Amino acid sequence: MSVLRPLDKLPGLNTATILLVGTDDVLLQQLAGSMLKEDCASELKVHLAKSLPLPSNVNRPRIDLIVFVVNLHSQHSLRNVEESLHHVDASFFLGKESHCSVHRNTVVKLAHTYRSPLLFCDLEVEGFRTTMAQRLVRMLQICAGHVPGVSALNLLSLLRSTENPSLEDL
Amino acid sequence: MRHSAWTSPFPGGKSESTELPQSLNRSQTDKRDFVAEISCTPAIFSAKEREAGARRVSLLSLSPRGLLCRGSQEMDETVAEFFRRTILKIPITEMMTVLKAWDFLSENHLQTVNFRQRKESLVQDLVLLCEEKRASLNDAALLDIIYTQFHRHQKVWDVFQMSRRPGEDIDLFDMEQFKSSFKKILQRALKNVTVSFRDTEENAVWIRIAWGTQYRKPNQYKPVYVVYYSQTPYAFVASSLLKSNLPLLGQALTVASKHHQIVKMDLRSRYLDSLKAIVFKQYNQNFETHNSTTPLQERSLGLDINMDSRIIHENRVEKERIQRVTQEIFGDYPQPRLEFAQYKLETKFKSDLNRGILAEREEPLRCLVKFSSPHLLEALKSLAPAGIADAPLSPLLTCIPNKGMNYFKIRDK
């Protein structure tokens, strides 16, 4: 029951909600701030969580995109994300989930297992953070269905990286 | 300048020397228009002393202070050099404050010096002024103590704890008796030693000791400082590298303060005030400020007051728990400042895997873990709220101020 499902709620009017999951609170907050500064036609809402499952007694809007933020300096952060992944329903993984990494290899494998797009970023540098925020806002709009003609699943196949085809055989 | 050495001519070449009559203790009222002393330091003196001598002469003839009487130079070269080096250490911005605290040169004297000139010239003027006032080695030592008091964080302080035999009577503490006893003990053991004292508030005394040996004069540039709080059994020692004199120092302290034993604590830091706070258990003073009226929730979430309402924290409960646990352990007050925590492990290697090269060793594995930070305890306090570690933290880390240790040895039970 504490599993997050993508389509169990009705969408809000013109709202797009993103859930950022990660242990480093300060960075998440900064990223959220950068995202909210972006110009966007839809209304944005950012939820920050340290780990899943989310507390169930809260009334929250439908979540369109989940981003797991992993800090490559900290094993704790990676393990936290791995555990949280168990609480996400499988259908989320059809495009509505991605990983954002603060630096690289276990994470690559993890992302590959879940078939989710992997983004690298140094979130502490202002410029990179703004760029990442822009990308996330665009992804969020697509996942929320606010961009006509492109769906989340389309985006997923577009974002799939082709650099390691041998991993498919593993 | 040693006039008596110049009566014999030098073996090589000509040299000029003006011999000033011995009755040259002129008073200030005996004004001359110009005083010139041409000196020639014989080659047997060291180059440094010659240079110092020559410099002083050139100043005498050029500076208007030369109009005042020089008299015979009573200050030793080494003392003058010590003065020069000590005053040179003082940053210009603090010069006035330190000199006033020293209180050797009066307001009037300080006013005659131009504090806006280049530092080297200022220092030279001040040294001349000190010479005029017949400043002694003790005055110089006192100035050194004051400089160190202003710059106490430049030294690393150890903490020593003294104890009495159980049941021993504690007489009233007499500061003067302590000082004379301390000095006597050191001087009896080591003929060449300079000991200076400066009283400060809270019944504390700063002691400066410059060590020499049987045959050598004390080295004024590597002194040891001791800060002893007379109403407590604690003394803080900042030593230079000469560790060989520490037992003697410990003995002198113990006997002079009527204790029986002295033990070095495993506590070391640059910040003397933090060490004091830890050892006297003064760090948990919770000062109420008017910021404490903000509701606990807002403060605990570390939010700005104008937080964007579109950002929602899902794990609010967890965050509050972490804040609460952190506050219980570390309190609301600013933490005392330490730079290191060092853990020496002498435990057998324990491993989850059954087989491993290290798991089969019988001897303990020796391992050293050192945490360092500009402000260690504040860093530890912010670990859990920043999400880098789980709360509560390991008691090995959180016990540091309570136990008054930052050097630990961990053995198997």
Image (spheres, rainbow, N blue to C red):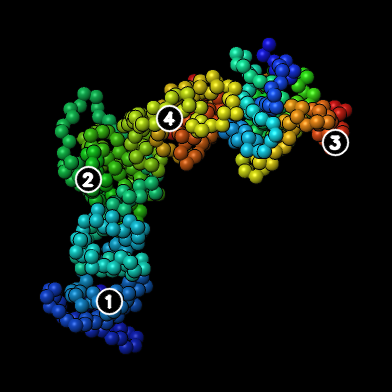
Q: Residue B21 location in percent, x, y?
A: 16, 80
Which amino acid, by three-letter code, is at mark 1?
Ser
Residues behind callouts 2 and 4 on a single chain: yes
Give the residue at mark 3: A162
Q: Is residue A138 left or right of residue B396?
A: right
User: Does A167 sit above or below residue B3?
Assistant: above
Which amino acid, by three-letter code, is at mark 3?
Thr
Of labels 2 and 4, earlier in sequence is 2
Give the residue at mark 1: B63
- Is disc 2 surrounded by few (<14), some (14 to 19) or many (20+) residues within 10 Å? few
Q: Are marks 4 and 3 in contact (CB under 8 Å)?
A: no
Q: Residue B145 location in percent, x, y?
A: 29, 51
For disc 4, the chain is B
Mark 3 element type: loop
Q: Is residue B394 left or right of residue B54?
A: right
Distance of label 1 from label 4 (alpha carbons): 58 Å
Of labels 1 and 4, earlier in sequence is 1
Residue A77, visible in the rendered structure: no
Mark 1 element type: loop
- Is disc 1 surrounded by few (<14), some (14 to 19) or many (20+) residues within 10 Å? few
Q: Which label number is shown at residue B400?
A: 4
Give the residue at mark 2: B199
Q: Is residue B155 left or right of residue B170?
A: right
Residue occupying the far bottom of the picture: B14
